[in-house]
Each structure stands twice: as structure tokens, then as C-alpha cells.
Amino acid sequence: MRVLITGVTGYIGRALTRSLVGAGHEVVGLSRYPFQAKAALPELKAAHVWQPTEAEPPGEAWDGVDAVVNLVGEPIAGRWTVLKKRAIYDTRIQATRNLIDGIRQLADRPTVLVNASAIGYYGDRGEDELAEPEPPGDGFLPGLTKDWEAAAASAERLGLRVVRLRVGFLLGEGSPFLKPQLPLFKLGLGGPIGSGEQWWPWVHLDDVVALYRRALEDDGMSGAVNATAPAPVRQRDFAKALGRVLGRPALLPAPKLAIKLVLGGFAAEVLDSRRVVSRAAEAAGYAFAYTELDAALRDALRGS
């Protein structure tokens, strides 16, 4: 199988590329900087230049492509200025529309699109258990992911099977989610964020990569899939587990007001409560490799 991946040099893109190539598949990358992409990932069959918010992918990128994985998107971490929010939105929604416009023009189309999404879809939902059929919440992140998924789903009208993977807080070696937390926790200064009562749905990178591969290969999988470990935890328990794995106390709270002052709109990502469960993955027969948080953190932090 030849797979076209956008956002190929991102955290998931690199790991997925190596996994697919290791299994005998070919991967073609789309990147704003294709030479750097090929240097970072020599496993790529080819890398093509693409400005995702400006145009469709180049025609030569589609040669022999059987499947597409769409991972492109401005990182959401950081203070949400007006310009930052516009970049977050356009690099997902407009880029996805441009990608599908490119597919529309093909005589020989790929059969499947696996599109990135996120648990931000659900918004702040307290104690509610959130399986895939639940509607989106309110606010910037739910609106963003709703529009992103709608843009991807339009490929179904072109005859593609579309899977939308809603990824949770991602753990793994070099995790962009864990990295900012580590300095304080290593000093013994970590602890609950806000009330600490909010639910954090986490997942290990190995399981995310495996779910992307399952979505590519399993013709029976379609629609939304929560890519989150079977047992979400409260944030205070996540903090305790991270401290435990690092051998440090994790007792110092970060007040909600302080988090909002520092992070602005992005604070919702860590303060919102999302008790997400992975019903669709379980129904497809997927068995998570990492079901216990401590084991996932130990693996993610090996060598740290």
C-alpha cells in the first residue's frame, strides 16, 4: 500500500511513517519543506512541497496513492492570540478542504482518508461519559474540531471511507504534551492543575500509531474513533502518577486563575473535563497496548 501523509514530520507523522515502512508499505510525504522532511525521514518514498492553506497538493504527489492520512495543523499549545487562533483553524479546516479538492480531481482516487481530530471536540463535560456518538461541546476547540471533521467527512461523497481519530493527551518518548510539565515535576514542584478533578483522557503513542494503521487497513472502520486509553484519569491522579514515576512529590497546586492568566484561551485544554471512552476502537476489536497510566509514563520517560 502507498500512503500519502500530510504533516509527515510531526510527532505522530514520524512515528507512523516508520511503522508503515517497517511493515512493507510505501509512504509519500507532503510538507512545506520537502527537503528537510526527506532528510529527517529517509524512509519516505518521496516528499512533495505543499502550502496547505493556499493550494491543492501537487498532482505528482498522488501517483499510485492508495490511502491518505491527514495530520497537518498548527500546534495548539501556546497563548491563543487572534493570529494564533486563525493559524490553528486555517491549517486544519482550509488545508483539509484543499486536500479533498485535490482528491476530487483524480480519476483514480485513494480508497480511504484517515483524518486527525482531537478530544477537544467534546468541550468541558464534567462527569459525563463521552463515547463517539456524543455531540460536540461549546467553545473554540469544539467548534474547531467539529468543522475539521466535517471537512474530512466530505470525502465520503467522493467514495472514500473516512475515519476521524480523536486523539487524547499523547504520551510517548519526547511527547510535546509531557515535555513542558517535566521541569517542575523533576524539581518536586508539580501537582494538581485547577481543581484536579477534571478528567484527562490519555493515550500512548504506540496505540495511536496502531489505531492509524488499523483505520487504514480495516475496511469495517469508519466515522469517529476516540483514540484514548480505556481508563481516563482525574488530573490530580495523573499528577500523582507522573510524580511517582519520576520519584518526586506532586503536591503543589496550580490555581485555575493563574493557569488562565498564563495560558489564556489555551487553558481550556488542561482545565476542561472530558471523560472520554474508546467504544469504537473496542468494537473494532482493538486491544490497547497501554491500559495503565504508570506503565505508559514509565515508557514515555525512559532515559529522562
Image: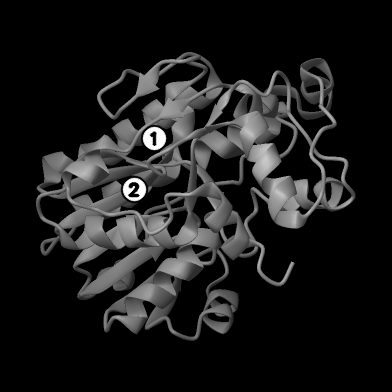
- Decide if residue 161 is on the left or right side of residue 209: left
Residue placed most toward the observer, 121 or 192: 192
Residue 84 x %, y %: 67, 35
Is 206 drawn above or below residue 241 in the view shown?
Answer: below
Q: Quadrant of the C terminus?
A: bottom right
Residue 51 showing in the rendered view: yes
- Decide if residue 168 is on the left or right side of residue 190: left
Residue 101 x %, y %: 28, 47
Q: Residues within 10 Å of mark 2 (few under 14, many from 20)?
A: many
Give the residue displayed 43% in from the left and 55% down from the top: 290
Q: Residues within 10 Å of mark 1 (few under 14, many from 20)?
A: many
Q: Which mark is residue 37?
A: none
How far is disc 2 from disc 1 in space, using C-alphas? 9 Å
- Decide if residue 254 is on the left or right side of residue 301: right
Give the residue displayed 32% in from the left and 18% down from the top: 135
The residue tagged 2 is 115
| Residue type indicated by callout 2 | Asn
| Residue type indicated by callout 1 | Trp
Mark before the other along the chain sequence, 2 or 1: 2
Residue 77 showing in the rendered view: no
Give the residue displayed 34% in from the left and 48% down from the top: 115
Say whether marks 2 and 1 touch (CB < 8 Å).
Answer: yes
| Mark 1 residue element | helix
Is 173 drawn above or below residue 285 in the view shown?
Answer: below
Residue placed most toward the observer, 31 or 51: 31
Is 143 drawn above or below residue 155 in the view shown?
Answer: above
Is 290 drawn above or below residue 31 in the view shown?
Answer: above
Residue 276 x %, y %: 41, 30
| Residue 85 lies in quadrant | top right
Q: Which mark is residue 148?
A: 1
Residue 14 x %, y %: 50, 69
| Mark 2 residue element | strand
